Image (cartoon, helix red, strand yellow):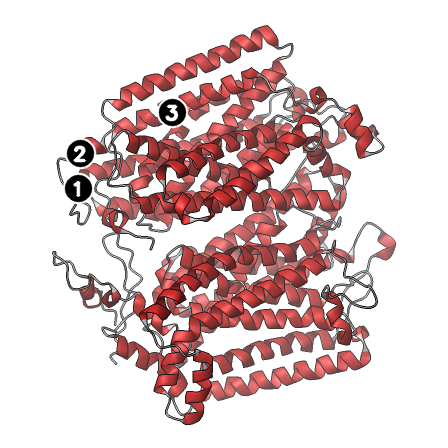
């Protein structure tokens, strides 16, 4: 397969940019995507990162075990900051889990064809991020063996969860989101699993992929039902993308605490989650397309589009920061103003300024097309966002440090267990993600083929000469 | 019809022009405006005992039409920002609505009068009120409030109107110029400016909603308020566009250019932004303030949940969310032109009710703080105190300003074709399909 570097980031109102490069036929697409799973050995980098990831995952296991046998005292959570790293990490990971379903559901409804190259692994990322998120509240309850108490299950103790608590709504919101995202991800994968099944060289592979392909034969009737189901799931998943992080924001905003109780929280959290989620997608996409040679599918245009979304949502988040600050002053509520002054100049001011720099300032580089299409610069920016979005939650949670009563003020510092648990959660996330890349179709082949000009029934039958299939050739060739 | 690369075939041009309908509708709009505003003034003179009531009704009518125009500007910028192809043939309606922003500053004059001649903007009189003295700088800076000249507030208003007029002029004039030259570079130019324009739009809409609507209740504050006003403007805009397109098609215009697919898409957007997003933002604001229940902010909702306002709130819940949500779920209603147009018309009424609910209620603060319980407050607070005094004047003023809006929009539509005839993406809009 030729790998000429084609610049498809042009912005010409007369024609749409090609989204799949260097492919004229469908079978070469299949070949190139399936190679990721069918190569006898993954690249060396996979082994190295997998080794590190699984080591970190192991650390997570040890930390959780230590926590369970010792108690939550091993964490830094203590009065007045009863919610420390666990809630910060929970919100951070749930936020990361927003991009996938946004790409697969909302961008689908908006007919954004470019989403097809990135939706599969973004959804996978979503699932794994939500799993990491779910871990933290679960281990935070202390006695994890009674975690089932959070579900409203009729029981002989006649004991029910507190329905008026947004923490319980969180249980519903996150589990609904996880379920629908998982279904969506899996359902979208069925045709591709069938492709892998049909191409399998060993019995074991054929049977394993075969089980999950659910007898897909690619018949007209199958596709018809598939597309109906896809549309319905997209419509159902769309409100979930907004509701999950809105409910997460309720955890804070229903309180009367300065810095937490503000009405902008739901949309601001959703924008922030999309922001952080897209940053993580770009973070993973950059090395993945490099290592597995997927640059014909995850093209520079895809990265540029995601960077634009990062700029938009980052600016929304910045706007919300400023709005909060403005209203903290305008309201004349002295406690609110105190909380914000404290954020900016108090004992954890450094965290606030890291947040401002990483989330508000750094993404502004993306105003320039040069920066949006430069791998090094975009990697710098998305790493800033990854850090910044973690610190955003840290800053919010630390509003607890200094409340209304000076005698109860304190200073929060995490313990080494907090730190290693957070690090370990990245290990869990990356381990799952690397396994996904190795064993499951990393790009939605069937969907990518559908957006190629060749899939258009009118392709090649135009009256005029302006056919789409010259697009690749006509594109300006960059060295 | 064979259309390629933005060259419309000749002969169809009559259906793409407003033609003789233009002057007719324009006259109708102007007459409506004169009758409406005239009737309102007469009613005001003969039935009102305070000018405050008149000005409040005026702010309501002004906000209602301003929201629709801002929605038009938003949609126009958004289409260039996203390089949209499907919407080319409906964009002119948005442009024409946005065009009203070039003259709407004239309608701001009565609000200036309201600042000095009435008490509806309570922040003009901060003396002795700790909170208002605290925030006086937001209105009077660099002067002291004794001066009675809210310089900072005025400067902001000038900036808002200037920015809106500039943006509307830029996008509408360039789009019209493309009809003549067919130059795709014009599209590129508009696309280049779209992101910055969107920033300017977000900033100005937010602070305009603080300055002119939220500050009516000078003590109250809510960080989500601009988003609420934005959602309302999206609702007003999409509903208006659907109604206008339906009327144009009934008059034999743009029948082939705006297809059922456009109806379905506009219906989806009305559903998504005008109904669901609006409800999401409304619920977020309400639930958080209700749940935390602190005196600084709950009064605003207690007012709207007492007396006659309780029924208006319920009407909004059912009429602005519940019913249209159910009605717009299926594609069949979105693809049936008269049905979709009726739902859009209904939502337009609801948009006005929403603005009425936003602007008219007055929080009887002393009663609120003295009442020991909610029930005691409700027993004490009369509809008069709560600002619930529906009056024919409100409708007359609204009808009058809507007449002006219609006249302005029609005037703009007569100036050029009803669709951007030579937009480079016109063929996409003519050919796209939902299913």
Label 3 Cα neighbours within 10 Å, binned few <14 / some 14-19 / many ≥20: many
First-in-chain label (3 vs 2): 2
Label of residue B8 in the image:
1
Q: Which chain carries label 1?
A: B
Q: Do labels 3 and 1 share a chain?
A: yes
Label 2 Cα neighbours within 10 Å, binned few <14 / some 14-19 / many ≥20: some
Label of residue B406 in the image:
3
Is there a contact, CB below 8 Å, between mark 1 and mark 2? yes
**Mark 2 element type:** helix
Is there a contact, CB below 8 Å, between mark 3 and mark 1? no
Instruction: Using the numbered discs, state the Cα–Cα distance from disc 3 to disc 2 in whole angstroms.
Output: 23 Å
- Residues B332 and B420: in front is B332
Mark count: 3
Quarter of the figure with the N terminus of chain B: top left
Instruction: Using the numbered discs, state the Cα–Cα distance from disc 3 to disc 1 in whole angstroms.
Output: 28 Å
Percent x, y of residue B316: 58, 35
Percent x, y of residue B40: 52, 13
First-in-chain label (1 vs 2): 1
Q: Which residue lies furthest to the front in this view?
A: A221
Instruction: Using the numbered discs, state the Cα–Cα distance from disc 1 to disc 2 in whole angstroms.
Output: 9 Å
**Residue at left 32%, top 21%?**
B25
**Mark 3 element type:** helix
Percent x, y of residue A343: 69, 54
Query: Relative to residue B182, is residue A273 drawn left or right?
Result: right
Residue B237 sits in quarter: top left
Q: Mark 3 lies on which chain?
A: B
**Residue at left 40%, top 62%?**
A228
Label of residue B13 in the image:
2
């Amino acid at each position: 397969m030729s790998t000429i570097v084609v610049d498809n980031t042009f912005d010409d109102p007369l024609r749409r940019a090609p989204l799949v490069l260097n492919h004229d036929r469908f079978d070469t697409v299949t070949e190139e995507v399936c190679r990721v799973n069918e190569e006898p050995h993954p690249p060396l980098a996979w082994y190295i990162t997998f080794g590190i990831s699984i080591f970190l995952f192991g650390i997570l296991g040890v930390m959780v075990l230590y926590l369970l046998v010792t108690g939550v005292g091993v964490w830094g959570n203590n009065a007045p900051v009863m919610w420390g790293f666990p809630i910060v990490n929970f919100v951070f990971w749930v936020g990361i889990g927003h991009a996938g379903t946004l790409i697969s559901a909302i961008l689908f409804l908006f007919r954004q064809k470019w989403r097809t190259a990135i939706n599969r692994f973004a959804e996978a990322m979503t699932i794994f991020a939500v799993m990491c998120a779910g871990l933290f509240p679960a281990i935070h309850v202390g006695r994890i063996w009674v975690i089932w108490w959070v579900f409203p299950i009729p029981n002989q103790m006649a004991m029910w969860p507190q329905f008026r608590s947004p923490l319980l709504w969180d249980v519903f919101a996150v589990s609904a989101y996880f379920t629908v995202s998982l279904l969506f991800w899996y359902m979208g994968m069925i045709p591709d699993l069938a492709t892998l099944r049909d191409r399998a060289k060993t019995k074991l592979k054929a049977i394993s992929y075969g089980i999950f392909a659910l007898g897909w034969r690619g018949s007209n009737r199958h596709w018809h039902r598939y597309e109906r189901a896809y549309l319905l799931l997209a419509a159902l998943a769309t409100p979930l993308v907004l509701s999950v992080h809105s409910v997460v924001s309720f955890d804070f905003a229903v309180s009367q605490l300065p810095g937490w109780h503000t009405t902008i929280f739901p949309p601001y959290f959703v924008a922030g989650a999309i922001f952080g989620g897209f940053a993580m997608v770009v973070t993973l996409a950059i090395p993945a397309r490099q290592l597995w040679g997927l640059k014909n599918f995850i093209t520079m245009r895809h990265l540029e589009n995601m960077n634009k979304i990062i700029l938009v949502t980052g600016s929304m988040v910045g706007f919300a920061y400023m709005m909060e600050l403005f209203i903290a002053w305008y309201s004349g509520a002295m406690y609110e103003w105190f909380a914000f002054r404290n954020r900016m100049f108090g004992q954890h001011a450094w965290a606030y300024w890291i947040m401002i720099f990483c989330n508000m300032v750094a993404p502004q580089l993306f105003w320039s097309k040069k920066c949006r299409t430069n791998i090094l610069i975009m990697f710098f920016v998305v790493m800033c966002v990854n850090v910044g979005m973690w610190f955003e939650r840290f800053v919010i949670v630390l509003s607890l440090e200094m409340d209304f009563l000076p005698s109860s003020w304190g200073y929060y510092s995490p313990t080494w267990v907090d730190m290693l648990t957070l690090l370990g959660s990245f290990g869990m996330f990356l381990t799952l993600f690397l396994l996904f890349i190795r064993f499951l179709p990393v790009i939605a082949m069937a969907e990518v083929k559908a957006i190629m000009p060749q899939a258009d029934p009118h392709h090649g039958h135009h009256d005029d000469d302006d056919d789409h299939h010259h697009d690749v050739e006509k594109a300006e060739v960059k060295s | 019809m064979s259309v390629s690369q933005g060259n419309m075939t000749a002969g169809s041009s009559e259906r793409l022009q407003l033609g003789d309908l233009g002057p007719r509708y324009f006259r109708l709009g102007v007459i409506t405006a004169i009758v409406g505003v005239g009737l309102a003034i007469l009613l005001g003179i003969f039935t009102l005992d305070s000018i405050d009531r008149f000005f409040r009704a005026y702010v309501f009518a002004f906000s209602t039409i301003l929201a629709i125009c801002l929605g038009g500007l938003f949609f126009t910028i958004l289409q260039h920002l996203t390089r949209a192809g499907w919407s080319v043939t409906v964009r002119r309606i948005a442009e024409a609505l946005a065009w009203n922003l070039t003259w709407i500053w004239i309608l701001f004059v009565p609000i200036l009068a309201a600042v000095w001649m009435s008490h509806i903007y309570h922040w003009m009189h901060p003396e002795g009120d700790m909170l208002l003295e605290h925030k006086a700088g937001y209105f009077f800076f660099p002067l002291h409030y004794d001066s009675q000249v809210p310089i900072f507030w005025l400067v902001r208003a000038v900036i808002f109107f200037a920015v809106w007029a500039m943006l509307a002029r830029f996008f509408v004039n360039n789009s019209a110029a493309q009809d003549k030259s067919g130059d795709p570079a014009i599209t590129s130019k508009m696309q280049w400016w779209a992101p910055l324009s969107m920033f300017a739009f977000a900033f100005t809409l937010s602070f305009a909603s603080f300055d002119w609507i939220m500050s009516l209740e000078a003590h109250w504050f809510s960080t989500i308020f601009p988003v609420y006003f934005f959602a309302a403007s999206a609702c007003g805009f999409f509903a208006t566009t659907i109604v206008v397109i339906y009327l144009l098609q009934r008059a034999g215009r743009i029948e082939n250019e705006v297809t059922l697919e456009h109806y379905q898409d506009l219906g989806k957007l009305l559903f998504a932004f005008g109904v669901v997003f609006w409800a999401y933002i409304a619920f977020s604001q309400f639930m958080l303030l209700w749940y935390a229940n602190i005196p600084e902010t709950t009064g605003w909702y207690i007012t709207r949940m007492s007396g006659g306002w309780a029924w208006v709130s319920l009407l909004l819940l059912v009429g602005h969310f519940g019913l249209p949500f159910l009605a717009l779920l299926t594609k069949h209603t979105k693809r049936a032109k008269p049905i979709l147009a009726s739902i859009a018309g209904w939502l337009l009424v609801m948009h006005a009710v929403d603005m009425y609910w936003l602007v008219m209620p007055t929080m009887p603060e002393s009663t609120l703080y003295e009442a020991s319980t909610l029930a005691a407050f409700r027993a004490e607070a009369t509809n008069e105190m709560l600002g619930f005094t529906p009056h024919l004047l409100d409708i007359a003023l609204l009808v009058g300003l809507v007449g002006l809006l219609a006249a302005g929009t029609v005037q703009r539509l007569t100036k050029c074709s009803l669709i951007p005839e030579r937009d480079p993406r016109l063929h996409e809009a003519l050919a796209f399909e939902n299913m």
